[in-house]
Every structure is written in C-alpha cells, then in structure tokens.
Image (cartoon, rainbow, N blue to C red):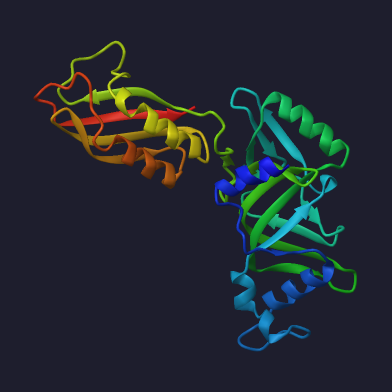
Amino acid sequence: MLLALVLFAAAQYPPRDATAVLDDGQVREICAALKQQGGEPAPGVQPSQGRAQTLSRTYVVTVPANGFGLGRYHESEQELELDGGHALRAVDGALTLDPTGLDDVVFRASPEQLKQWTAAKKDGQLSLTLYFRPAGDGCAGNPAARIFRMEAFPLWWQLEVKSAPVAAADEEGLPVDKPGSGRTFHVEKVLLDSDMPRPDFGRDRLASAQGALDRCAQAARRRGSLVVSFNVESGHVHDPQVIMDAARDEETARCVARALSGAAISGADAHATRGTASLGVQ
C-alpha cells in the first residue's frame, strides 16, 4: 500500500488541498452555497461558505463498490472504461454525482489486474475516488429526505483496492501510468531534409540520447507518441520543438526537448539543416 501511494505522489497528483465530503450535512451546505445569489448567503449557510468559495474549492469523495460500474475492457490497449451509464452514488446514497466526461474515463489495466479488480468489486473492496469542483448551479435535492444530485468538474479519478490506489485517470479521463514502471522511449523514425529513403527509417540516429529519453519515459504520466522538429548544426540537434503530442503530457514533452537538445545525430551529412523525429513511450 505504501509503495502505491509513493508512486502516485511522485506524479504530483491527486490534488492535495481537497476537502473530503463525508456526510449529507456537507452535501447540503455545498448545495445551499451554490444556490446563493449575489452577496447574500443562502439560509443556513455561513458567510465563509459562500458561492464563490464553494465553486473554487476542490472536493474529494469516495464512491463505494456498489456506487459505480466498470465498463468495457479493451485487451489490445489494456484499458478499462468506467460505465458511463451507471450514476455515481456516494455518502451512503445521499449524493448522486454527475461529473462531466464520465463516458470517457479510462484506466490502464492488464488482464490480471482486471480479474483482481472485478473480484475486489464483487467483495466490496474496490472503490472509486473522485476529486472535483462543483459545477455552477448544478445541484438539486431534497434536504428533508437527505438526497442530493450534483454536477461536477472532475480533476482526478482513482481506483482503489482496500483504500490503496491501483489506477488513475486525469481530468480528461485519460489513463495515468505509475512513474517508474519500466517504460522506454522507442524512436520510430528520424528524417533529415537531405535524406534519401532508408529502410530502417533512421531509428538509430538518436542513439546518443536514448538514456535521457528513457528517463523521460520513466516519469511520463501515460503512454503516447510525439513528433519533434529540430535544426541540425554540425551533426547535432538544436532548438528541438515538440509539434505533436498525442499523450497530451506537457512535462514529458519538455523533458524530451531537453533530452534531444545537443544530441549527436549519426549519419547527418553537411547539407542537413532540418529534421523530424517520431517517438513514443512504450
């Protein structure tokens, strides 16, 4: 459990300043604050719990095993979807959450992990933790019956087994890998403007930067492809720019640019001035 927590902390997520939603009284206060108009507090709401503060605050709620559904599993990509048609029910059934993008949430999962998590869910040991911000006026309910429904903007999704995180997805629902999971950067193609076609696509031309690229891969949040353009000066990479980032991971893109800057390019002739490299985290 400790190792899993350390791995996720290394990715600097999830948000650390979140307020835990633990009971229906908190939900009632959040909903009342969201309905506040102008500068006047809603009935039963303290001034410190006003609408603006509530909208800007990050909350975290844990959805138990019976409060969410697992969706389709894509074995070729080793990705598990959440069931977007299954409403998220938490706080002992008092809160139903409607987070945006629920249909698009995906977690990385091997076939063995899928088997383990499915069994854990059946045993009530799998939970879903959601970090979110309330969405405007999107809150309705019956305070007397202690039943509320709230719209939310997700910031971080996390599957947990016995409260230990096992998989995560970011605010867009894209899977986030644990750092240090043995990933590498695979150079798929390196093309120079003076090139004749090569059957190996120039994959070995950036071998001098492979170690630095692999260190970037170790810290990457997810797998994906990048395309980098660069200048060639005296057989070395200058001014590398990531022009396509399918992984949508800005920190990894910056790391790749730093790793390639100044790297030697094997086989570059004196006429080469520009080049592109296609590579991906595996």
Tell me if 192 is positioned left or right of 148 in this view. left
Residue furthest out toward the bottom: 40
- 183, 68: nearer the viewer: 183
Q: List x then y, in percent, for residue 228.
A: 31, 35
Residue furthest out toward the left: 271
> Which residue is located at x 59 percent, y 45 percent?
173
- 146, 132: nearer the viewer: 132
Q: Does residue 40 lie above or below 185 as drawn?
A: below
Residue furthest out toward the front: 2
Quadrant in the rendering for residue 89: bottom right
Q: In the rendered picture of this protein, how many numbered marks are placed on residues?
A: 0
- 170, 71: nearer the viewer: 170
Quadrant in the rendering for residue 111: top right
Residue 127 visible within the image: yes
Q: Does residue 10 lie above or below 182 as drawn?
A: below
Question: Quick one: quadrant of the N terminus?
Answer: top right
Residue 84 visible within the image: no
Quadrant in the rendering for residue 122: top right
> Which residue is located at x 68 percent, y 86 percent?
47
Q: List x then y, in percent, for residue 169.
A: 61, 44
Q: List x then y, in percent, for residue 241.
A: 28, 41
> Which residue is located at x 52 percent, y 41 percent?
221
Q: List x then y, in percent, for residue 275.
A: 22, 30
> Which residue is located at x 51 percent, y 29 percent?
183
Tell me if 236 is positioned left or right of 94 in this view. left
